[in-house]
Amino acid sequence: MLDYVATYPANGIVYRSSAMQLAAHADAGFHNETRGRSRNGAHIYLSEEDARPRWNGAILALAAIMKPVYSSVAEAELASLYDCARAMVPLRQALIEMGWSQGRSPIQTDNSTADGVVNLTIVPKKLKSMDLRLYWLRCREAQGQFRFFWAPGAENWGDYYTKHHPPIHHESKRPQYAGILPQ
């Protein structure tokens, strides 16, 4: 933290004007913490109502170690989507009450299995451990609150909060996450 402040003394978060549509990128780092736990991360921001919303500064960033031990990457990714969507519900409501109507808030994942399960293109056989989160996500999508979509991991801004990256990666991502918009 001190190195960052010394390197960028006058920095801040840059927000660009947008249509005030809530969007997010969610990701999970599977079994990369002690005792077999996974890490959850999300980048929640305001953008346009596009198929793939453009970058904007985060209004909320999630980074936490998930307490349950998950048995698969897809299960951890579904838990990450659930935590992200659950955090977005009060933000959506606040935006609606301020007069900014919200369509389906897009949430990006980089796990094709989690995307397939939540969008009903994959029918899993055993869902006992995923039931609560999965059906909550499907219910909210059916209500028109969220739209889940897949994109490659390199394009997922939630990835930064979930993986143990080398210092060079953090240095290369500083401008993006700390206020300088990508070109």
Image: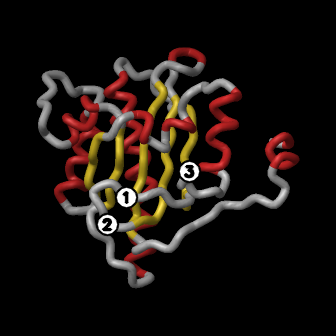
Residue at left offset 35%, top offset 40% = 109
* Cα–Cα gap, marks 2 and 1: 7 Å
Determine whether the residue tagged by mark 1 lies in a helix, strand or loop. loop
Q: Quadrant of the N terminus?
A: top right
Mark 1 → mark 3, Cα distance in angstroms:
17 Å
- At which x and y percent is residue 67? 51, 30
The quarter holding residue 53 reads bottom left
* Discs 2, 1 touching: Cβ within 8 Å: yes
The disc, 2 or 3, on the residue closer to the chain's N-terminal end is 2
User: Are circles 2 and 3 on residues that touch, CB within 8 Å?
Assistant: no
Q: Identify the element where label 3 is drawn.
A: strand
Is 18 drawn above or below residue 172 in the view shown?
Answer: below
Label 1: few (<14), some or many (≥20) within 10 Å? some
Q: Is residue 8 left or right of residue 50?
A: right
Which tag is nearer the camera, tag 1 or tag 3? Answer: 1
Residue depicted at 76% across the width and 58% down the height: 11
Mark 2: amino acid? Glu
Q: Is residue 8 above or below residue 18?
A: above
The numbered mark, 1 or 3, whose residue comes first in the sequence reads: 1
Q: Residue at x 48, y 55 (%)?
A: 44
The residue tagged 2 is 49
The amino acid type found where label 3 is placed reads Ala
